[in-house]
Image (cartoon, rainbow, N blue to C red):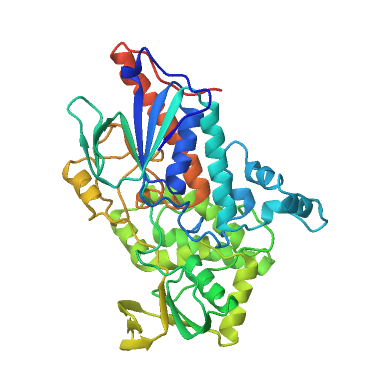
Amino acid sequence: MTLVPAQFSSPSPQAGSLVRIAIVGRGFTGLMTAIALLKAFQGPFHLVLYDPYPKIDGGEAAGRSASTLLNSRVRDLSIDPTAREDFRRWLETDDVWRERAASPAGNVDHAFVPGEVFSAYVYQRFSEALRERTDVMVQVRADSVTAIGRHPGGGFSVLSSDGQTRFDAVFLATGYGLRDGADCASIHGSVAEALVIGGGVHAVDRALRLLAAGEASHVTLISASGFLPQPHTSSAVGAVTSDRPFPHTLRGAFRYLREAANRAAAEGSGWQGIMNDFRQRARALWQGLTPDERRRFKRHVKPIYDSHRNRLPPGQYERLHRAIAGGAITVRKGKVERIATNGVLLSTAAGLQVLPADRTIDCRIRPTDLDSPLFRALIAGNLVQRDELDLGIFVDRAGRVIVEPEVFEGLFAMGPLGLGSLPDIDLVPEIVVQAYAAAEALAASLQGAQTRNGGPPAGRNEG
């Protein structure tokens, strides 16, 4: 499918010099990258988006199920980093949200919205950005990309089921999401016992929806770490800072965090503001940690850190704990070794246990599949490198793939693919900022290359 603005102007007579850009993945990360390119990359270009299964998905921030309530506030979901109020203004074009904003208790900035609302906003902003660029052509291909390699004439060869195509730059935006075969559909009637595997916001949301829809009488929620998401505050809080110097070791940082959270709790201000401040410092801290400290973080700290950064809306948190107290939800800690049609085999501290169930739903977040044909080809071609934690691949702040120092060939890995390099890069605000940084980095790179070759430069779109 080819998308062009109504007043599309062909770049002829120099069509052969048209910059060709591919985005592999058309979930939230891929579409956000496309929006940033349309807004920040100056000069005509041909953009191709590959994805056989497009979904708006921003990791734990933007759910794969459209009916899921997102766990980020409206104020944090703008796709324009210079206009934080953009999503709120878009919402208020709807009568219901406009009336809510006008009511005495209404504060749309602090609200939580369903996934389909956010999806509609992102797609509309993408359509508007494309309409404004009469010099850009966009193609959407429902093809699976199986390999990417260096092209003999420069740039990259992208191999898909439709053949091989050359591009000047490639953005990997495959992200991650629910595991293949996850059961997210409603069923007719009710079952007595349902198992939901996962300890994140998607799993909690699925368990609560099963009970609310009468699809299960009881739900067992299986969390590998035993932790469940903590709550947002009833009203948004900013970062709570301290004048104490911030430590540069993992042990020191978390001692600092515990002490600050205890002080906040004693003062009645809550730990959420402390965590917001810590997340702003996390990237600099992460860059300074040794590989051993990063591995210790993954083994011992990541589950509890994730439970405090990926928070539940207050209403959901209250419903979860009412259901636990009332016996409608039971939480089990353990590793699922095998899933069968009638339950799971669970590894616990007490040994292997069989948990029978009438229905099992796997809501675990799938890590980046570095053993897929695509990533095997990228690694074999020395185009990407695994990070030391196997969370993804090495990137810089703009998503540029790092293989050798000071060498950039035009390959980006966006969003969750860079979690081993950039903490919190699976959340919507961080993906938005990275997308614009990537668009500007690509423009600067191509401008430098074209200037060296004596061609017309490509640069930032200042409009």
Number of marks present in the image shown: 0
- Residue 423 location, x and y as percent? 42, 52
Q: Residue at x 28, y 14 (%)?
A: 453
**23 to 39, vertically: above or below:** below
Q: In this view, does 53 lie to the left or right of 66?
A: left
Taking depth in this image into account, of 167 and 141 the one nearest to the observer is 141
- Residue 265 location, x and y as percent? 63, 68
**347 to 234, vertically: above or below:** below
Specify the quadrant that holds the N terminus.
Answer: top left
Taking depth in this image into account, of 345 and 164 the one nearest to the observer is 164
Q: Is residue 33 left or right of residue 338?
A: right
Q: In this view, does 233 lie to the left or right of 59?
A: right
- Residue 410 location, x and y as percent? 31, 32
Taking depth in this image into account, of 348 and 243 the one nearest to the observer is 348
Taking depth in this image into account, of 440 and 244 the one nearest to the observer is 440
Query: Is residue 166 visible in the rendered structure shown here?
Result: yes
Q: In which quarter of the image is residue 352?
A: bottom left
Q: Quadrant of residue 116?
A: bottom right
Q: In this view, does 265 lie to the left or right of 166?
A: right
Query: Is residue 288 visible in the rendered structure shown here?
Result: no
- Residue 301 location, x and y as percent? 40, 66
**313 to 445, vertically: above or below:** below
